[in-house]
Image: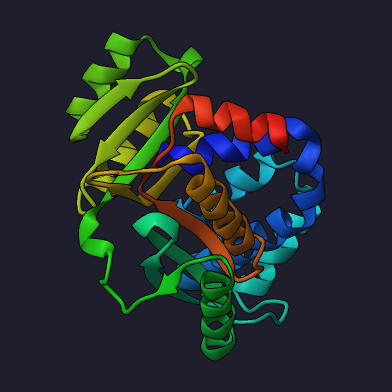
């Protein structure tokens, strides 16, 4: 799954992060509203809302904007009701793609997602057409500064995590879907709020990409992420660093 994440980092280094700031805020606000609507409107009592608020703060969203989104989501100040939907399909080169969205109009979103797949060399499939190639897991991320690798490993296992890995920038704790809430709460009591805590789709295997196919795939992923209704895109490509560097130089 790291392929398009690396590409996104390349794009951000070229100054495109600010251009997508408005769309990022739209996605964060929808997540805050949905979290507030499906649970309590208090971040301290609603872990999903707490995670959404933390993500919004990391994106430098103002407190007033966050508070308004919570009020709208909880019904205190009007606001739409967003439904969680998932789309699955294949991208260029047979890469498996999962798209998670929050929408107030399923027909509109399905049409837009299908159109994006078709225009960018992909094919939208039925539900579970590629889901079996991924594992649905809990992912909890902490900055390196909160603990040593050994301390985080021990704490993660005590909290019921399936695996703990320390990378260049974060500690990554993986859990089962059923064990996610307990692990998140246990780690939060020990280390404070995580940088991120959510359920994600991790590929069980990857699909090798050549330069031409990788370029088309990244265009598909970027177009999907540019859609207001789309929250997250997961894919199972494997793009060599040399090709990523070449695409960066050409962009």
Instruction: From the viewer's perspective, tell me whether residue 80 is left or right of residue 90.
Output: right
Frontmost residue, 42 versus 201:
201
Coloring scheme used: rainbow
**Which residue is found at the position 52% from the left and 86% from the top?**
106
Which residue sits furthest bottom? Answer: 107
Q: Is residue 101 visible?
A: yes
Instruction: From the viewer's perspective, tell me whether residue 189 is left or right of residue 44.
Output: left
Location of residue 245 in the rendering, given as x and y in whole percent from the top left corner: 59, 26
**Which residue is found at the position 66% from the left and 68% from the top?**
228
Tally of marks: 0
Frontmost residue, 26 versus 130:
130
Picture layout, residue 118 above or below residue 132: below
Q: Is residue 95 visible?
A: no
**Which residue is found at the position 48% from the left and 56% from the top?**
233
Quadrant of the frame with the N terminus: top left
Q: Quadrant of residue 147?
A: top left
Picture layout, residue 147 above or below residue 164: above
Instruction: From the viewer's perspective, tell me whether residue 30 is left or right of residue 89.
Output: right
Q: Quadrant of residue 96?
A: bottom left
Frontmost residue, 85 versus 3:
3
Location of residue 135 in the rendering, given as x and y in whole percent from the top left corner: 23, 52
**Which residue is found at the position 27% from the left and 48% from the top?**
137
Picture layout, residue 102 above or below residue 244: below
Frontmost residue, 27 versus 39:
27
Quadrant of the frame with the C terminus: top right
Location of residue 93 in the rendering, given as x and y in whole percent from the top left corner: 39, 55
């Amino acid at each position: 799954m790291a392929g398009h994440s690396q590409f996104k980092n390349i794009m951000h280094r070229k100054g495109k992060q600010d251009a997508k700031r408005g769309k990022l805020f739209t996605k964060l606000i929808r997540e805050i509203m949905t979290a507030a609507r499906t649970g309590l409107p208090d971040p301290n009592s609603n872990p999903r809302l707490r995670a959404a608020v933390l993500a919004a703060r990391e994106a430098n969203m103002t407190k007033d904007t966050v508070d308004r989104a919570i009020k709208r989501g909880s019904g205190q100040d009007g606001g739409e009701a967003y439904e969680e939907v998932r789309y699955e399909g294949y991208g260029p080169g047979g890469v498996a793609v999962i798209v998670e969205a929050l929408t107030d109009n399923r027909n509109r979103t399905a049409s837009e997602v299908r159109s994006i797949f078709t225009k960018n060399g992909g094919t939208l499939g039925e539900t579970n057409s590629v889901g079996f190639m991924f594992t649905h897991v809990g992912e909890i991320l902490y900055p390196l500064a909160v603990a040593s690798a050994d301390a985080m490993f021990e704490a993660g296992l005590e909290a019921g995590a399936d695996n703990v890995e320390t990378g260049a920038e974060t500690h990554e704790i993986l859990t089962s879907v059923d064990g996610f809430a307990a692990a998140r709460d246990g780690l939060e009591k020990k280390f404070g709020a995580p940088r991120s805590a959510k359920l994600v789709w991790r590929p069980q295997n990857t699909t090798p990409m050549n330069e031409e196919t990788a370029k088309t795939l990244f265009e598909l992923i970027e177009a999907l992420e540019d859609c207001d209704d789309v929250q997250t895109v997961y894919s199972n490509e494997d793009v060599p660093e040399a090709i990523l560097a070449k695409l960066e130089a050409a962009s």
